[in-house]
Image (spheres, grey):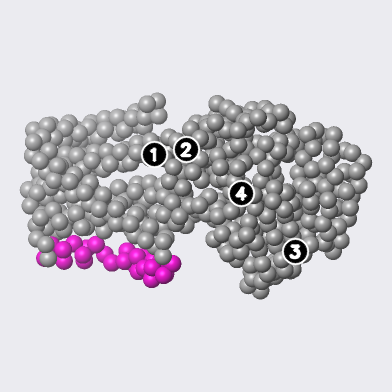
Amino acid sequence: MKRWALPGLVLAALIGLWQVAASSGALASVLGLEDFLVPSPAEIASALWENRSLLAENAWVTLQEILLGFLCGLAAGLGFAVLLRLSNTLRRAFYPLMVASQAIPILVIAPILLVWFGFGIGPKLAVVALICFFPIAVNAADGLRSVDPEATKMMRTLDASRWQVLWRVEAPTALPFVFSGARIAATFAPIAAIFGEWVGADSGLGVLIRLDSAQLETARMFAAAAVLTAIALGLFGLLALAERRIVTWR
Amino acid sequence: MRQDTKVATRTEDFAGAEASPAGGNSPAAAVSVRGLEHSYGELRAIDRCDLEVPAHGVLGIVGPSGCGKSTLLELISGLQQPGAGEVEVGGARDRGGRLARCAFMPQRDMLLPWLAAIDNAALALRNRGVRRGPARKEVGRLFERFGLAGFERARPAELSGGMRQRVAFLRTLVSGKPVLALDEPFASLDAITRAEMQGWLAGALKADPRTVVLVTHDVEEALYLSDRVAVLSSRPARVVEQLSAPAPRAPDRDAAVTTTEFVAVRERAMAALHRGSR
């Protein structure tokens, strides 16, 4: 808790500065904008409170997209990495393709998914999963590759089957790497979800933000963004907690 | 935080203790190496080696660094298949048979950092399908004998070098294999701990005899622990000389390695080493 004292102080100071600058109109005139386009923290907070059920509804939609998409990307990434570890042929065939797949812009894939699958959660899930897949797959594959060959030799003379070597040695070795990849994926997941919503959705924080942008409901826009940030931080924090509980040897 | 315990080094500490799981009562296996040759691609690693280890005998192998000692050990224990020649372990010539009869202890202890000491030691049993509870119980009985009482649940990072080596030994012994292939087991220890561990291993083998092939760069260690010592040349390795140890695994290590006889044999071994290094 002590760690958060100093950053917390800085954050509070910044917010305080922002509040003063915005409510006095100074911020708006500096930026050359109308007053209502530059909301103060207090206005954002009240917009947050007034629209709490609307924000909660949409946040829940976006949260589902983020969480489920992340889990799908995680499962696919891990499965892929394990497959590539178990078969040299598959690795030679698919690793370069996997790297190349990252060059395909999500901007292209999302609208296609919309055309194919419509406005349901599916396309958004797919976009999030695609974004999450690569960092997890690459890091997991690297983690599996980093196993000390001496450990494998030792296990072989202790009558370990290939599966046992994977489960008892390779998987735990790769875990810290997997968490690194997961953290990166967690950073991108909310962005991917919002983008998916912008391409085609009828609910979610992304939809809300876009609507508010069109209607110049800036305070609520900021409030939605704040909720999204909270979700992202929550996901990040959950991962950090999980890592602390699971990876207890480093 | 590193912890350490006094090593049980006297044979009496081991006498009367029951045999390790399936260990002391396993069928004894002899090791025979004939005309062994091995290369890594262009690189010739081993150039005609002939060695014999009787059942429950200890063969020490010394040689200059990089001469192929570890390769020889891996070939014996079935981790690799020789380019030419024959390796027979307990009657088995195929790699699978050798692998089944040999427990290989790599140079670094290779304890898995995410497992407690007792779970590391029980790995062989777990791989065979024994459930964690019974496996822990079976292995736990031995912790005291190895001077590790109380450290069953400790993680490897909390143990000193000597203790980790002992856990690695325990893991090797628990596998119940008749042949132990030890690759420089004490190389990473300081001189004092190393001497203690040598005395300790001598006692452990007296209580639970196995066929042992021991690779080490320490001539004195080889001569103390083994019945016979083979001196290898530098790469490509061949056997320069084989010597009989004067007092294999004598109870008082420090006295044994300072007798005139011991010193004389050590001189001969060093001379052979020098010959082979040229």
Camera-near label (1 vs 4) is 4
Q: Is residue A42 left or right of residue B137?
A: left
Mark 3 or mark 2, which has the lower sequence index? Answer: 3
Amino acid type, callout 2: Ala
Label 4 vs label 2: CA separation? 22 Å
Residue under circle 2?
A: B135
Amino acid type, callout 1: Ile
- Does the magenta run of residues contain B220? no
Image position, residue A229 (x, y; %): 24, 41
At x 49% / y 43%, what residue is drawn?
A: B125
Label 1 vs label 3: CA separation? 49 Å
Camera-near label (1 vs 3) is 3
The answer to whether residue A230 is above or below residue A65 is: above
Label 4 vs label 3: CA separation? 24 Å
Residue under circle 3?
A: B50
Mark 4 or mark 2, which has the lower sequence index? Answer: 4
Q: Residues within 10 Å of mark 2 (few under 14, many from 20)?
A: some
Residue under circle 1?
A: A246
Label 3 vs label 2: CA separation? 39 Å
Camera-near label (4 vs 2) is 4
Q: Which mark is residue A143?
A: none
Magenta segment boundaries in residue numbering: A88-115
Mark 4 or mark 3, which has the lower sequence index? Answer: 4
Amino acid type, callout 4: Pro
Q: Give the SS element for disc 2.
A: helix
Image position, residue A171 (x, y; %): 42, 50
Q: Is residue B219 left or right of residue A136?
A: right
Q: Give the SS element for disc 1.
A: helix
- Does the magenta run of residues contain A89? yes
Q: Which mark is residue B27?
A: 4
Q: Chain of mark 2?
A: B
Q: Chain of mark 1?
A: A
